[in-house]
Image (cartoon, rainbow, N blue to C red):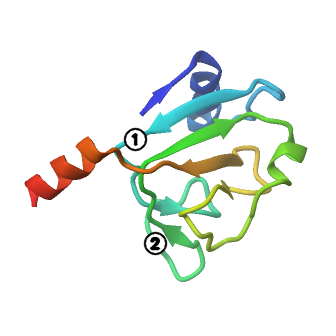
């Protein structure tokens, strides 16, 4: 995971269970994909019948934007992860998840590893 300073502040707030600074927009990316996580509960540690566990591939994230920004994107508990969607909607940690396609080089490496 790579991120800019504003995203680092957002992650610090998340880890500290505090509210991120409003309007401090950050950018981060996970081009190798992310770990599986709940799409509705920021602090879920494992899948349950109600916490909407999802798998994420390579993606970029926009964090800390004004809540109205996120209104432009789907907020489904069980999103289509092939298109941009809001993760942890309605919480102080809501953020935009935007999938990216793996490059031909990355796809070749994955195929070779199998």
Which disc, if any, is residue 31? 1
Residue 38 position (above or below residue 112): below
Evaluate if marks 2 and 1 touch, with contact meaning CB atoms under 8 Å apart.
no
- Identified at 74% across, 33% down, the residue is 64
Q: For mark 2, what is the residue?
A: 47
Q: Is residue 44 visible?
A: yes
Q: Residues within 10 Å of mark 2 (few under 14, many from 20)?
A: few
- Identified at 18% across, 50% down, the residue is 108
Residue 1 position (above or below residue 75): above
Q: Is residue 17 visible?
A: no
Direction from residue 29 to residue 80 in the image, left or right: right
Which disc, if any, is residue 89? none
Direction from residue 88 to residue 110 in the image, left or right: left
Q: Please state the horizontal and vertical placement of residue 34, each as a whole percent of the image.
A: 41, 50
Front tag of 2 and 1? 1
Residue 92 position (above or below residue 52): above
State the residue in front, 76 or 49. 76
State the residue in front, 17 or 37. 37
Q: Please state the horizontal and vertical placement of residue 109, each as a whole percent of the image.
A: 17, 47
Residue furthest toward the bottom?
Answer: 49
Q: Please state the horizontal and vertical placement of residue 3, each as a whole percent of the image.
A: 51, 25
- CA gap, disc 2 and disc 1: 23 Å
Quarter holding residue 103: top left
Decide which of tag 2 and tag 1 comes sooner along the chain: 1
Residue furthest toward the right?
Answer: 68
């Amino acid at each position: 995971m790579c991120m800019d300073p504003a995203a680092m502040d957002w992650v610090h707030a998340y880890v500290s269970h505090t509210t991120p600074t409003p309007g401090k927009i950050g950018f981060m990316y996970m081009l190798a994909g992310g770990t599986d996580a709940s799409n509705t509960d920021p602090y879920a540690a494992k899948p349950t019948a109600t916490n909407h566990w999802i798998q994420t591939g390579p993606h970029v994230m926009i964090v800390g934007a004004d809540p109205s920004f996120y209104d432009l994107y789907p907020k489904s508990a069980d999103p289509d992860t092939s298109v941009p969607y809001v993760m942890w909607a309605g919480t102080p940690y809501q953020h935009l998840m935007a999938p990216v396609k793996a490059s031909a080089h990355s796809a070749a490496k994955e195929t070779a590893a199998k």
